[in-house]
Amino acid sequence: MEYLGLTLDKFQEDAINAIEEGNSVVVSAPTGSGKTLIANYLIDLKIKEKKKVIYTAPIKALSNQKYKEFSKLYGEANVGLMTGDVVENPDAPIVIVTTEIYRNMAIAKDERIDKVFAVVFDEVHYINDIERGHIWEESVIFSPEKVRFLCLSATIPNAQEFSDWIMKIKGHNVTTITHHKRIVPLTHKFYDIELGIADLQEIHDVANIPDYHHAVRGKRQKRQRPQFPDHTKLIKELGNELPALFFCFSRDRCEKKAKELAETGMFTSSIEISNFVRNKLQEAPDEICRLKTTKILRETLSRHIGFHHAGLLPVLKEIVEELFAKGLIKVLYATETFAVGINMPARTVCFDSLKKYDGISLRYLNTKEYFQMAGRAGRRGIDTHGLVVTQIVRNEFDYEKIKKVTSKDIEPIKSQFKLSINTVLNMLKLHTEEEINIILKQSFLAYQMEIKKRKLDMKTRFENKINQLEKLDYIVNRQLTDKGIFASKIYSDEILTTEIFGTDRVDKLDEEGILIILAVLSYEPREKDRFFKPRKNAKTREVRHIVDDIPLTRKDNRFRYVYEATSLVGPCQNDGSFFDILDLTNISEGNLIRFFNQITDRIQQIQRASMNPHLTQKITHIHDRIRVFLEAVNRI
């Protein structure tokens, strides 16, 4: 079978046949094997049938990329986008959304859901994510019965179990398609400071020599700090195995390594790249061109070297992605978000390390994380093989752990189900007691526990949540109060947001005070963040006083940062420029955009939840102010 000019593999044909039979489909296949073609076929089919399709993505960057891709394929009029802070053409036949947005629509029984026939869950193995995995479960549980799913995943050993769960709770046929063979096979190698590129066994064989774990080139080290190999020598040894995608789990290291490689003079300058970058930045504000990051990027890109991470402005990320897609970048240093969904493979993938800090501790990658990134090696139709090279840190060398991570993707998906405040409130608001009892037994967690013959008392957890909410006056006699109704439309920090914005306390706040509180709730503290001019004035003290009068907010650690967060929104409040913030903090431009987009998302939630016309007027004005403030930099 041929589709879009390509001869399909058997697993793609099998998935398409199942779709045509009206089944839901779970596809488990290696990264880069062509799962997206199945989604394209589903969309083509449903558009012809005049049926609505929602495409969900785990991160906003992938949603934006799919929006551009689908707009070219199907025409802008047929494609919409909803990512929390951005809403474009939401009534289109194809709508790309973040998974959180779809879950929120499904759980609230949004009327737009009634028109949906099929939902594509891209990267559905995110159900494994400790923080966000429950979003995928709830998306399935609360979807209307008529909806069919196309679940696309990197290889998961328990794909059939996942399909069986969907079939049990939704009552329709679910076909499981598993595919293990890559069109472009991967070769997994490792880079040792003395052996160079070698097999893991070769490194293991010499790891028992005296001082292997503590020496570099024979010199004894007094301090056992990690001894990283020279990445520039690794790139040189790769020779014809370029282009390479080099994963680093630090934005700073991405930039630093790109500069170091550029300084070696390994690659000649490119006038073509310099002209491309100049043309792309021609209409950008002068301030963007003067940014330190922009200057570094222009310097490295001219030598076919780039870096990509969430801290970059959208226009800079776009430049890097387009140059990489054109084949003009020989080495790209990137954080792991570059591996999620965005179809930009290279001949070689390198790992700076197999350890990353996950917000809690420094740990080894799991097999799914490793193979998600490693799978970007090998370009279909261009390369006969893909090469994966992991740098070995000698004094941290652990043969068994490294072998376990890099040998095979063996991580099954596990439920991360939890009952959020929003979930409990919406269940009470929109479902009968009988329906609630059924829903509580429908989680993937309940299904997995049942298979293991273990008891799971989700009903007790549900009742405990209700008891807590009754004490806070969100529920009375199993009916939602005004506060409960407000909180049912808030999807993060439900209680804190409601206690401030869903009560008459908000009447004490003017626009500046509202913006300050939204800033505090949206700011995500990082250890390296610095603030040069925290704003301590009458307004921040007034906000602090209001917050301290509310027991729940008084105990929230984020309000320790009220002065710092206020400084970030100061230029916006005072009709300044986005670039003025860069004089107030060392936070990267990309993170600052994310910060304001988070504020926008919270504003939109409050707008939908509030019946207070005075609040609506104030918060709409703030929303408009932020939109204008970000116009110069916040491009899709």
Image (spheres, grey):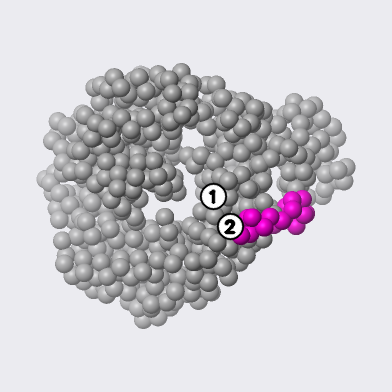
Whether residue 400 sits left or right of residue 88 in the image: it is right
The CA distance from mark 2 to mark 1 is 10 Å
Would residue 272 be visible to someone looking at this image?
A: yes
Say the numbered circle drawn on residue 276.
Answer: 2
The residue lying at 78 percent from left, 27 percent from top is: 202
The residue lying at 51 percent from left, 53 percent from top is: 318
The residue lying at 51 percent from left, 63 percent from top is: 589
Give the magenta part as a residue range: 259-277
Spot occupied by residue 291 in the image (x, y as percentages of width and height): 57, 68
- The residue that label 1 is drawn on is 322
Is residue 195 on the magenta stretch?
no
Q: Is residue 518 above or below residue 440?
A: below
Q: Observer-nearest residue: 54 or 327? A: 327
Spot occupied by residue 361 in the image (x, y as percentages of width and height): 56, 45
Which three-letter amino acid code belongs to the residue tagged 2? Phe
The residue lying at 24 percent from left, 63 percent from top is: 501
